[in-house]
Image (cartoon, rainbow, N blue to C red):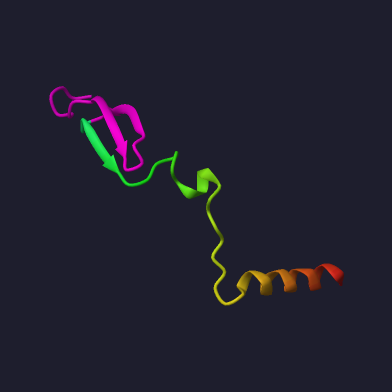
Amino acid sequence: MKQGIHPDYKPAHIVCSCGNVIQTRSTVEQLHVEICGVCHPFYTGKQKLVDTAGRVERFNRMYQQDEKS
């Protein structure tokens, strides 16, 4: 690697809006994020499936009909 062209890679703190602080390394000393792995609905199990116009039920009915044949 060439000397003198790369930015400094130093310890950094990532601060989430929920209050979680993650320590890592980056070219930026502090980052503020809105959502992290602690408060994300997918990882906490609070994620809900949004069914628009009954698509999930329609899929399940079609799948059950194919299974019976």
Please tell me which residue is depicted at 71% across the width and 69% down the height of the picture.
60
Quadrant hosting residue 7:
top left
Region rendered in magenta: 1-26
Please tell me which residue is depicted at 35% across the width and 30% down the height of the picture.
22
Residue 15 lies left or right of residue 61; in this view the side is: left
Please tell me which residue is depicted at 32% across the width and 47% down the height of the picture.
34
Q: Where is residue 20 in the image (x, y as percent from the top left)?
A: 36, 34
Q: How many marks?
A: 0
Q: Which residue lies furthest to the left in this view?
A: 4
Q: Which of 30 and 66 is in front in this view?
A: 30
Q: Which residue lies furthest to the front in this view?
A: 19
Q: Quadrant of the C terminus?
A: bottom right
Above-or-below relation of 69 to 34: below
Please tell me which residue is depicted at 44% across the width and 40% down the height of the picture.
37
Q: Which of 60 and 6 is in front in this view?
A: 60
Whether 18 is among the magenta residues is: yes
Q: Which residue lies furthest to the bottom in this view?
A: 53
Above-or-below relation of 42 to 57: above
Above-or-below relation of 35 to 15: below
Residue 10 lies left or right of residue 59; in this view the side is: left
Q: Where is residue 32 in the image (x, y as percent from the top left)?
A: 26, 41
Residue 24 lies left or right of residue 29; in this view the side is: right
Q: Quadrant of the N terminus?
A: top left
